[in-house]
Image (cartoon, helix red, strand yellow):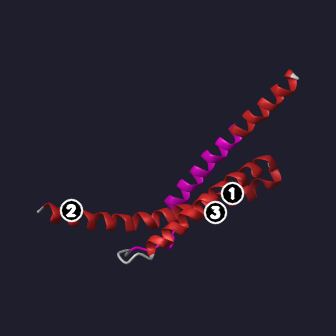
């Protein structure tokens, strides 16, 4: 009886993971798009901030390529019934992405300002 319920639970988990894989692929695509757009918008008005976003995008890109490779491997498994094709954005998702981008830009600004202040303090101490 225990084996029967474990098998039932495993099937539920497989169904859930099929959905989560698609969500992850979509998130990776949307985040990269958001960072690219933010970087392009700031290149003229704030090159230092655009540079920090480029650094973040490159770091994320290294990890994302690894994750996408693993997801591709998962999609080739015999029991995989989901998809690794990114989903489509809806208006609410676009708003969430814009808010997330705004929060990330604020974080980058704070880090950049802190680094500038530290460098200024180091120069004053010398």
* Nearest to viewer (mark 1 / mark 2): 2
The correct choice, above or below, for 82 with respect to 108 in the image is below
Q: Which residues are magenta?
A: 82-110
Residue named by callout 3: 33
Query: Spatial distance from mark 2 to mark 3, Cα to Cα?
Result: 40 Å
Q: Which residue occupies 75% across, 35% down?
A: 115
- Is residue 123 visible from the viewing direction of this image? yes
Q: Earlier in the sequence, mark 3 or mark 1?
A: 3
Helix, strand or loop for the magenta stretch, by majority: helix
Q: Image quarter for residue 120?
A: top right
* Relative depth, front residue between 38 and 85: 85
Q: Which mark is residue 6?
A: 2
Q: Which mark is residue 108?
A: none
Query: Spatial distance from mark 3 to mark 1, Cα to Cα?
Result: 12 Å
Q: Which mark is residue 58?
A: 1
Alpha-carbon neighbours of circle 2 within 10 Å: few (<14), some, or many (≥20)?
few
Give SS at disc 3: helix
Q: Image quarter for residue 1?
A: bottom left
Q: Earlier in the sequence, mark 2 or mark 3?
A: 2
Q: Which residue occupies 81% across, 50% down?
A: 47
Which residue, as the protein is rendered here, is positioned at the far front? 3
Which residue, as the protein is rendered here, is positioned at the far right? 126
Marks 3 and 1: CB-CB under 8 Å? no
Task: Give how far across and how far down residue 35 sits, in percent.
Answer: 66, 57
- The answer to whether residue 47 is left or right of residue 77 is right
The correct choice, above or below, for 72 with respect to 95 in the image is below
Based on the picture, tell me whether residue 101 belongs to the magenta stretch.
yes
Which residue, as the protein is rendered here, is positioned at the far top? 125
């Amino acid at each position: 009886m225990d084996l029967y319920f474990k098998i039932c639970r495993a099937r539920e988990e497989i169904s859930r993971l099929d959905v989560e894989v698609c969500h992850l692929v979509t998130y990776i695509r949307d985040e990269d798009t958001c960072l690219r757009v933010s970087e392009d918008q700031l290149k003229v008005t704030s090159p230092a901030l655009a540079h920090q976003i480029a650094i973040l995008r490159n770091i994320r890109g290294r990890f994302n390529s690894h994750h996408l490779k693993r997801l591709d491997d998962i999609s080739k498994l015999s029991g995989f019934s989901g998809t690794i094709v990114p989903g489509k954005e809806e208006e609410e998702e676009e708003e969430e992405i814009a808010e997330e981008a705004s929060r990330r830009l604020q974080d980058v600004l704070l880090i950049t300002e802190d680094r500038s202040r530290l460098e200024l303090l180091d120069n004053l101490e010398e």
